[in-house]
Image (cartoon, helix red, strand yellow):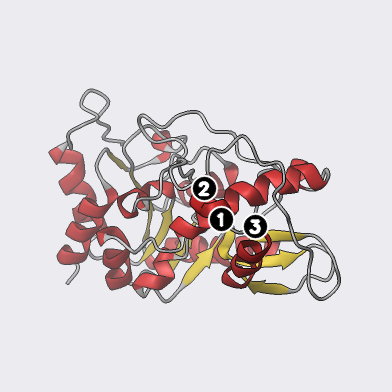
């Protein structure tokens, strides 16, 4: 049975909240996190309450030509300068203390690793890495950031007041004149080492996550979803997999999700608060 709180989105439903804590307090856990977990670190999400409609660049658009990549990197260069200083919040630290069997994150910000979580699969990659689409060399984002600063002096400072968006870029319309470098090794196209809309999550990452979810059925564990609307299949598939094997699912999110009907408990609450309470419960 799913205990939902449709009538009071700004308050927690004590029955669902406490029952969910009780369910999760002694079971092996796999945790799936989304953008809602990082909002307390100052990184906006795509689909939370009050979030404006945002259309991120697709992979097909990124590879369509130099103009699209100029637009992307001009925005991302400004956004990265702010995103890289974000710090883990209480939710990240609580998850590190919980140390689940596997932490699957749809986030690309690296804050779980920064908080000390050990077993992490970054489903959509890491925004602090860059990959060449030709030779597949992976390099540090900070190195590219310095190159972009040298090629575009004053660009970031000139757009310091522009709003940051969830995927690490900013809401900037005029990007003409921004210089984008190529790969230093082969001259190929550089792309953030993240899965864009229109790309597929690498199969090996999905397999690791599916195996962990499947083991929950054997160990009488549970799947906890924290801060994700499950709007895309990359996360929803794990909820469906768990529910199919009768593994209980708990969803903690301020807003409805595509997995609500599959959840044993849906808790409408902040992730930092709930995860801190869960960590205290499991001590």
Q: Measuring 44% from the left and 35% from the top, which residue is drawn there?
A: 47
- Between 93 and 188, the one lying in front of the other is 188
Q: Position of residue 168 (x, y in %)?
A: 52, 51
Q: Is residue 196 visible?
A: no
Give the answer, above or below, for where 280 lies relative to 60: below
- Between 196 and 242, the one lying in front of the other is 196
Q: Position of residue 197 (x, y in %)?
A: 66, 44
Q: Are marks 2 and 3 in contact (CB under 8 Å)?
A: no
Q: Are marks 3 and 1 in contact (CB under 8 Å)?
A: yes
Q: Position of residue 9 (x, y in %)?
A: 24, 29
Q: Give the position of the N terminus as an image quadrant.
A: top left
Secondary structure at numbered mark 1 = loop
Q: Are marks 1 and 2 in contact (CB under 8 Å)?
A: yes
Q: Quadrant of residue 119?
A: bottom left
Residue under numbered circle 3: 152
Q: Measuring 61% from the left and 59% from the top, which residue is drawn there?
A: 153
- Measured in 3D between alpha carbons, the distance from the residue under mark 1 to the one under mark 2, in whole angstroms, is 6 Å
Residue under numbered circle 2: 158
Secondary structure at numbered mark 2 = helix
Figure disc tally: 3
Specify which label sits upstream in the sequence, 2 or 3: 3
- Between 159 and 110, the one lying in front of the other is 159
Give the answer, above or below, for where 97 lies relative to 272: below
């Amino acid at each position: 049975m799913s205990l939902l709180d449709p009538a009071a989105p700004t308050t927690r439903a004590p029955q669902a909240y406490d029952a969910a804590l009780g369910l999760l307090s002694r079971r092996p856990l796999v945790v799936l996190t989304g953008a809602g977990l990082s909002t307390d670190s100052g990184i906006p999400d795509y689909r939370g309450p009050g979030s404006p409609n945002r259309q991120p660049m697709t992979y097909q658009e990124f590879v369509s030509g130099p103009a699209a990549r100029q637009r992307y990197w001009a925005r991302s260069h400004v956004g990265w300068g702010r995103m890289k200083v974000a710090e883990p919040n209480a939710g990240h630290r609580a998850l590190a203390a919980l140390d689940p069997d596997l932490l699957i994150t749809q986030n690309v910000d690296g804050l779980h690793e920064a908080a000390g979580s050990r077993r992490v699969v970054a489903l959509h990659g890491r925004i602090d890495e860059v990959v060449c689409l030709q030779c597949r060399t992976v390099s540090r984002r900070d190195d590219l950031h310095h190159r972009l600063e040298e090629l575009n002096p004053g660009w970031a400072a000139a757009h310091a007041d522009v709003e940051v968006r969830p995927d690490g870029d900013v809401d900037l319309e005029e990007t003409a004149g921004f210089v984008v470098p190529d790969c230093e090794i082969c001259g190929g196209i550089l792309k953030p080492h993240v899965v864009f809309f229109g790309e597929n999550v690498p199969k090996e990452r999905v397999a690791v996550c599916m195996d962990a979810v499947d083991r929950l059925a054997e160990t009488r564990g549970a799947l906890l979803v924290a801060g994700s609307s499950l709007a895309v299949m990359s996360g929803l598939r794990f909820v469906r997999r768990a529910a199919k094997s009768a593994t209980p699912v708990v969803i903690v999110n301020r807003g409805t999700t595509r997995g609500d009907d599959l959840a044993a408990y849906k808790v409408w609450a902040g992730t930092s608060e709930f995860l801190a309470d869960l960590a205290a419960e499991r001590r």
